[in-house]
Amino acid sequence: MDNKRKTVLHWGLGGGAAILLSLVLTDPYLRSVLTLMAISALLAASLRFVMLMGELNFALAAFAGLGAYAAGYMNTALSVPFVLALPLAGLFTAVASALFGAITLRAKGPYFLLIGFTFTEAVRVVYSKIPALGGTSGMIGIYPPLSLDDWMAGIVVATSVILLLGLFAAERSDFGRILLAIRENENVARSVGVNTYLCKVIAMSCACFVAGVAGGLHAFVNTVISPGDFSYLLAAFALAYVKVGGENYFLGPIVGAVVLVALSHYAIGLGGSEHFLYGGAIIVAVLLMPSGILGAFGKVGPRSVETKVRAARHAV
Amino acid sequence: MKIQLKSTAAIVALSSLVAPAAMAEETIKLGLSVPLSGAAAVWGKGAEFMCETAADEIREDGGISVGGETYNFACLPYDNKYNAAEGTKVAQALLNREGVRYIGGSLGTAPVKALQSLAERQGVLVFTVAWGASLKGTDHPMTFTQMNTPGEILPVLLRYVAERHPDAKSVAMLNPNDATGQETEALASKVWTKNNVDVLTSDFYERGTTEFQPIAARLASMNPAMIDLGATPPADAGAIFKELDVLGWDGVKIVEVGTGADGLKATGGAAADGVYMGAGVTFDGDTVTDHQKAVNTRAKERIGESLNAVQIGFYDSLYALKAAMEKADSIEPEAVADSLPRVTFRTFYGGEIGFYGTNIYGRDQQMRLPIIVTQVRDGQLEEVARLIP
Amino acid sequence: MQHVIQLGATALQIGAVYILFSLGLTLIFGVMRIVNFVHGHIFAIAALVVASLLPRLVEGGFAAPTAYVLASLAGIGAALGLGALIYFFGFRHFQRDLVGSFILSIGFVLMLDGVLLSLFGGSVRGVPEIFPGTLSVAGAQITMQRLFLCAVAFLMAAILYWALAHTKLGKALRAVAYDHEAAMMVGVPYGRIAFLGFLIASFLAALAGALLAPVTIVSPVIGTDYLIKGFIAVIIGGLGSVPGAILGSFFVACIETVGGYYLDSSYASIAIFTLVIVVLLFWPKGVLGRG
């Protein structure tokens, strides 16, 4: 019980601090960095949620894009207000990803990864072919209501905290345990009567709901979206956040997103040399800190998975 | 623990804020939002070079004098990776971190839209080479265009080609499936029809394509008298003409907004001969000044190929800004934007020019640059017609 | 009829390059169980070295074919060096770790993007034709350059096919791909075999780069397009399967050629992706994939 109270306390303090920070920051630049960190953390946490069952969801970029375009289209063409467009974008993405998952989750491991990769690239071409979505030059004018303008950073961070809490609860629930069991040995899980296929599709859909809302936030924060925003690199970066932060920790993707987004904002002033720094940071982190920043700094925060599982996994 | 994390994050973010040290106080920072990585990196690098060249020249000439003070330009190139999300990051960093109030030039329709959206809210003056017609007009009083766009080029170029080849009555068109390609295609098919030329097909291909044989086979199978590659980048265009040559197609070749012959020759070889271009700049011939030659030689050393019209725009914008600042006797963006349409300045192409465009865009926001029709002849790019609008 | 032959010839030529590319991908996956996104850069570095060295050698007085061979050797050498470096400092520690090796390869991709751009510049390089001339086969036009490319590609595929079945190394590679623990138990030195497999794969990519340099657009970003098509080919054929990679390559080449001819070529790209999904509906492990 004590553990549970501690967890609640952690969430209250951490989430509260993040929201408070977003409200007290007045510098528009730091605010924009903070919102980007929150959105990136959401994407990374979504990716990690699917990783719980041992799959790498590279279609994340496509689903974040679907969320962004859905929110953008609803807001600009159908005049759906911001507060409604955001959850609807998430729902739309969840349904689309359930369909995608129902087809592709029959395949596993590298196949699932690579299908996600090709799907992402195909969806981008499709956007560019639809004039109603702005074609290749992108969709403009996706504004939240003027009265919310000053509160956007707070709204983004608060939404992120709520969704992260949702993912956390799901991971700690029986459903989360089933996902871990699937990762360890799907056949065993199936033999005790779990419909593993259905569980995987549901997990995919939940994770993509989060990705869709993250995409919607991205659209409203940037006010402009283009097909180029949602290339496979978005998923690659999300994976970097997970890996650099520490994939065995729920906090891992959040820490990774904060550190790497800060780094990328520093690097952006270096012109074309940005790639050196960013790529270099990923290589160094992966080689020297195989269980991420959190792993390297010892047993910080709640651990969710035994390290043993990690080593045994993916021996396809 | 979590609080600690967040505060660490804040420190990291803050330290990035301080990193690029402040410049001397009489410096006017010019932000550049350009691709510095990926396929279009060479354009961004060239843009950076041209901005610096003009800034150096202006400094040596004694700078900009406004209200008794002397100012100089400094160029801050940021990589927008050609997409809106990175364009937003760049815009945030330039406007809110660096405190930039002038964008010396910006490239790529999607990232420029992202930049414009933020810049307009902050009253920042934006120069751009991006073509999107939606970027221009009376809704965007702080945006100015530093390069000829299809609206200027196509009517002149296509009429010239149609008159030179009166027997050629059919054309097949191909454009890259991106903002510039879609923009160019929409206008070009209208202009061709106006010149009584039949448009047999108008296709798009994905940027980054490396195998052009199927595309060439399709174009050749229509048996057009002319093939118009619109906004296809020169290197891709060269590869397509080469495949067409193998297939035995021979006709009038056009790359409407072809910017340079180097890429065209690199991939097309002899098949590039005869190609007409509407945005090419030649550095051979008698009309080329020593200044142009010298700058181009240095550019070649630095970026590996001849300068093109996109990059030259990043030179001209600095002289335009200088003239407007001195006329307005102010470095406030709104006052400068107000006087820009009324000044003349020395362009890289030679001669004094101003701004025009009220007829098409509702306000004088387009540099009155010469429209130069060039053709590749015996491996050299030659100027065949020049029109000053 | 003539355009059918022309389309067939085109598909064959494009397919030949995809074969070289996807054979490497499938080999690395089979032996090490990793998805290698750096493959495209290994290909690119070979093409870039050829493109920047060849003109200098020709100016230096070498005959074009000699210069081409020399430049190709240098390009393949550079690519193999890069491959060995990446293996020793990276992938060696991430064998059979799909997620870890993948994120590492993304790190390498980002870094090499920067390295190649600053080493070679972003401008496109032209490579003079080495084997000029065009061959006319039943009305279809094929350049000698492409014909040479095809011949080498098919020869390499045949050699690899034969070597996997008949040589000691080939058998060891197959054994490791089939069950690496059992192979190690009967005395196959896994580490060495994995390294050799990685080098052979890098060699195939480098060879493709050197062969393609004179017929395509050489720039630092050239690898991505081939990488995507190569991956599609191996997904369709089945990861780890050599005949699958060949089959998949032809499949992609055919769709690309026919789609690009009858449709707009950007729709052909969508068609390729859609077909991948359809194929996977019926064969979740690729057409010729095993468990």
Image: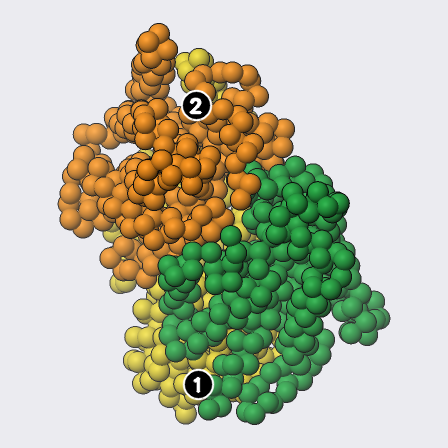
Chain colours: A orange, B yellow, C green
Figure check: B25 above or below B282? above
Quarter-of-image position of residue B381: bottom right
- Residue lying farthest top? A2
Residue C115 appears in view: no
Mark 1 and mark 2 on one chain: no
**Residue type indicated by callout 1:** Ser
For this view, does A274 lie left or right of residue A73? right
Quadrant of image for the N terminus of chain A: top left
**Which dot, 1 or 2, sits closer to the camera?**
2
Q: Which residue is pictured at 47% across the width and 59% down the height? A: C286
In front here: C108 or A298? A298
Say which residue appears at 44% left-offset and 13% top-offset.
B1
**Where is residue B96 shown, x and y percent of the image?**
40, 31
Q: Which residue type carries mark 2?
A: Ser
Vertical arrangement, residue A173 with respect to residue A282, above or below: above
Report the residue at 35% width, 72% height from top. Answer: B188
What residue sits right under mark 2 in the picture? A304
Percent coordinates x, y for residue C285 in the rendering: 47, 56
Which chain contains the residue that carries disc 1? B
